[in-house]
Amino acid sequence: MGGVNVGLDSVSKAVGWNHHCHHQPFNPMIDDEQLGFLANFLGIFIFALVIAYHYVMADPKYEGN
């Protein structure tokens, strides 16, 4: 098994996996401020959709049927 590990190590070094991984941008978890902004934005957006839905559905012009 030692030969297999050495072979994999030499392949990963030849392909450059270690070099490639260091250039990937690190995407950290969002912080509290971003989470609060996202929650407020989604809440306002959904509330506006509900208001728009009720405005369209309660329009007296379309209740003629």
Image (tube, helix red, strand yellow):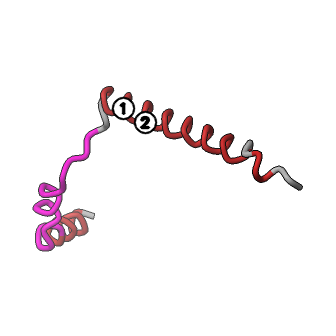
Q: Nearer the viewer, residue 60 or 17?
A: 60
Decide whether residue 25 is among the magenta residues. Answer: yes
Mark 2: which secondary structure? helix
- 5 to 64, vertically: above or below: below
Point out residue 57 in the picture as x, y percentages from the top left corner: 73, 46
The part of the chain drawn in magenta is 12-28
Amino acid type indicated by mark 1:
Phe
Q: Nearer the viewer, residue 18 or 62?
A: 62
Point out residue 51 in the picture as x, y percentages from the top left corner: 61, 38
Q: CA distance from mark 2 to mark 1?
A: 6 Å
- 57 to 39, vertically: above or below: below
Left or right side of 55 for 11: left
Q: Residue furthest right?
A: 65
Mark 1: which secondary structure? helix
When asked about the image quadrant of residue 24, the answer is bottom left
When asked about the image quadrant of residue 30, the answer is top left
- 61 to 5, vertically: above or below: above
Point out residue 60 in the picture as x, y percentages from the top left corner: 77, 45
Q: Which mark is residue 41?
A: 2
Q: Residues within 10 Å of mark 1 (few under 14, many from 20)?
A: few
Q: Which mark is residue 37?
A: 1
In which quadrant is the C terminus drawn?
bottom right
Identify the residue at image location x=43%, y=30%: 40
Amino acid type indicated by mark 2:
Phe
- 8 to 22, vertically: above or below: below
Identify the residue at image location x=47%, y=38%: 42
Decide whether residue 19 is among the magenta residues. Answer: yes
- Number of callouts: 2
Identify the residue at image location x=28%, y=64%: 1
